[in-house]
Structures are given as structure tokens and as C-alpha cells.
Image (cartoon, helix red, strand yellow):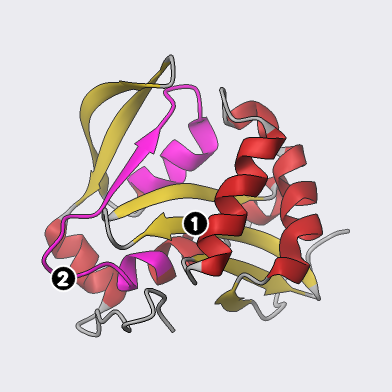
Amino acid sequence: AALPTHSPVFIRQAAPADFPAWMEMTATVRDDFPGMAPADHRGVMERCTARNTAFGAWTEGELAGGTAFSPKHGGIGFLVAGREQEAHGIGSLPARKALSCMPPDREAFVHVHPATLSERSLLLSLSFRESEFIRRGGQVYQTLLPSSERLKGIVGQSRNLPAAGGCL
């Protein structure tokens, strides 16, 4: 479905009822995530949903993008938007929300596969910078780190983390 030019976008925590929409969205971009099988992705989403560390961007009643993250480790583990939604900048909204949930005393990071051009481009547009390469599960990933000055501008000064581990 074509995305209307001025459709409102709502960011909310993921819920178990969202799993079918998550799996449908990720199927459209699966080639961007080498080494991640659908069962792996569902497992990550189940764990992050239970911990309140997954957000979805919804517009016109459909999941348009989302992220799963770990405040404990400071990492964004998954960031995706449908192909059409990427063109509307929707992917940056869940990323910004996840970054606002990171503890202020921990540097945020993202590991991206070098072939994941859409996620990489989105993060670089948010002023992440390239850092070292790591090997994980037989795949090579590059660590991207946000510029601390740009991070302050993205999330403002309200970086807090409720005791339950989520962030709203």
C-alpha cells in the first residue's frame, strides 16, 4: 500500500500480538540481514518484547519499522523499516526512541553486516561513525558508534531507564 505523504507515525512498545506483522515486515528485507534466520529473529523479538526493549513504528494501522535493543549492553540489535517506509525516513524514529532508552553512562553501539546497506545508511545519517570489525556467529560485522554530540541532539536530556528495563 502506498504510504500517504502526511500519515501520522506512532511509536509504541512491541507486544506479542505484533509478531505476525514483525515477521511479515522482516521477510521483505531478509536479504539485508545475512546469517539471521526467521526463527532467530522471532526469538530475539520474543525476548525483547518480554523485556520491553522493542519498539514499532506504526502508520495507517500497519507496522512500518522497528527496533530491538539492549539497554544493559548499550546495543541496538535490530533496526528495520519496510522498503517504502525507508524512503519516508520512518526507520529513524524507532532508532531515536531506542537511543533515548540507553543508560547515560554507557556508550551506545550497533553491529551491522557490511552488506546491510539500508540499515548502515540510516545509522550513518543519524551521525553514527564507523568503528572496528568483529566476528560473531561466523559472520563479520562492523561496529557503529553514535557521535556523542549528535546523540544529545537526537534524544535530548531525558535519558532515563525505568526499573523494569523498558523505556516509555
| Residue hosting label 1 | 68
Pick whichever, 101 or 61, lies toward us.
101
Q: CA distance from mark 1 to mark 2?
A: 18 Å
* Label 1–label 2 contact, CB within 8 A: no
Q: Position of residue 97 (x, y in %)?
A: 42, 71
Three-letter amino acid code at the position of disc 1: Ala
Q: Residue furthest top?
A: 138
Q: Nearer the viewer, residue 43 or 156?
A: 43
Q: Report the disc number at residue 104.
A: 2
The correct choice, above or below, for 168 with respect to 140 in the image is below
All told, the count of numbered labels is: 2
Q: Residue 159 in the image: x percent, y percent?
A: 24, 79
- As drawn, the residue found furthest toward the right would be 1
| Picture quadrant of residue 70 | bottom left
Q: Relative to 151, is 57 on the left or the right? A: right
Classify the position of the N terminus by image quarter: bottom right
Residue at left offset 50%, top offset 31%: 117
Q: Which residue is painted at 24% across and 85% down in the image?
A: 158
Question: Alpha-carbon neighbours of circle 1 within 10 Å: few (<14), some, or many (≥20)?
Answer: many
